[in-house]
Image (spheres, rainbow, N blue to C red):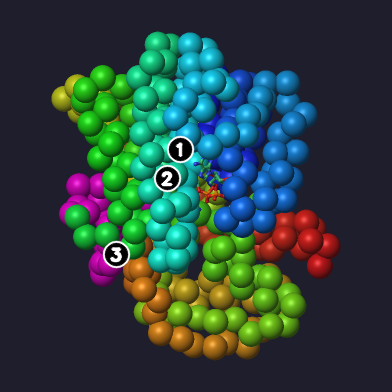
Amino acid sequence: MTVLVTGAAGFIGAHLSRRLLDDGHRVIGVDSLNDYYDPAIKRARLDTLAGFEGFRFSQLDLAETGALEAAVDKHTITHIVHLAAQAGVRYSLENPRAYAQSNLIGHLNVLEFARGAKALKHLAYASSSSVYGDRSGGPFKETDETRKPVSLYAATKLGGEMLSESYARLYDISMSGLRFFTVYGAWGRPDMAYWIFTEKILRGDPITLFSAGEMSRDFTYVDDITDGIAKLLATDVPRNDGRAHEIYNLGNNTPNALMDLVGAVELACGREAEKIFEERQAGDVSRTFADISAAKAAFGYDPKTKIEQGIPEFVRWYREFYKV
Ligand SMILES: NC(=O)c1ccc[n+]([C@@H]2O[C@H](COP(=O)([O-])OP(=O)(O)OC[C@H]3O[C@@H](n4cnc5c(N)ncnc54)[C@H](O)[C@@H]3O)[C@@H](O)[C@H]2O)c1
């Protein structure tokens, strides 16, 4: 396979690139290396891939018309995993246009690239559990209602799914939309709760918990996600009634309360945190919980990691990386 990975310097993109290279595939990575969070981490992730002969990287902004076509020979690409996006729920209140640029225009430009890529077998792209809106109960199924996003981030991820649906129908491009559920792990994202808690607890600073009593998340370890994507690419996924585009939840199927996450970080850091409790922030949802039976049946997705195992792995990496 020759796989175009967008967002290759990002958290999930770098892990996926590594997994695909380890499996002997060629990876063409692209990323804008934007400064939503410290680009030094993105460069350090790329450094871990630089030694692989099968890895090529181009820095470019997918929202720029023609940038992808200018950097990548589309005829060589057999698979695309489109992960580049403006992520983060809270930042979408501050900088909404970044979401329109990367998640709508950028997504459309990837679809246009795919339309002309004649050797392309499959395009998988990242969607998000946030498309389910603010729900109770669960597990959430791919067929559930998704017309009530509570953040602009969620709205643009849903928009990406809609753009894909139209291109899959119009141009018969085989696609999978992957709704990731709160992914965490080594080389993670500095804007996410597990990272912020670790940073503050190790420094001895208090942590702020928003709506701590009610919030739960289906925390999913990054290796389980990349294993799922690798399995999807390796499988000629059977499609229902000839449809080219399917949506799959990639979660852990085990929601944990936010306080369980805090407890796991405290245990791994060997310190108890001073906690400040605050009200829920706009755009946040109270619960996520993935039904993963569709991904299991279609390509053998099989997440294994509990937060009791995954969080210590993250904290170990963090301490080594920052020497704390
Ligand atoms: N991490 C999670 O918990 C989670 C949950 C649900 C969905 N997702 C989705 O998974 C994907 C990967 O997320 P991540 O956690 O690795 O985030 P990340 O921010 O670490 O990675 C995204 C990368 O995309 C790049 N990028 C952004 N806009 C770009 C553009 N216009 N052109 C080129 N590159 C651009 C960024 O520089 C970044 O390196 C995203 O689509 C995100 O929305 C992530």
Residue type at mark 3 is Val
Q: Quadrant of the C terminus?
A: bottom right
- Residue at screen point 43% across, 11% down: 119
Residue type at mark 1 is Ala
Q: Which residue is mark 2?
A: 101
Q: Is mark 2 within 8 Å of ligand 1?
A: yes
Q: Which residues are magenta?
A: 128-146
**Residue 273: x, y in percent?**
64, 84
Label 2, label 3: how many angstroms apart (C-alpha)?
19 Å
Label 1, label 3: how many angstroms apart (C-alpha)?
24 Å
Q: The residue tagged with tag 2: helix, strand or loop?
A: helix
Residue type at mark 2 is Gln
- Residue at screen point 69% across, 63% down: 315
Residue 63, disc: 1
Q: Which residue is mark 3?
A: 150
- Residue at screen point 53% across, 37% down: 61
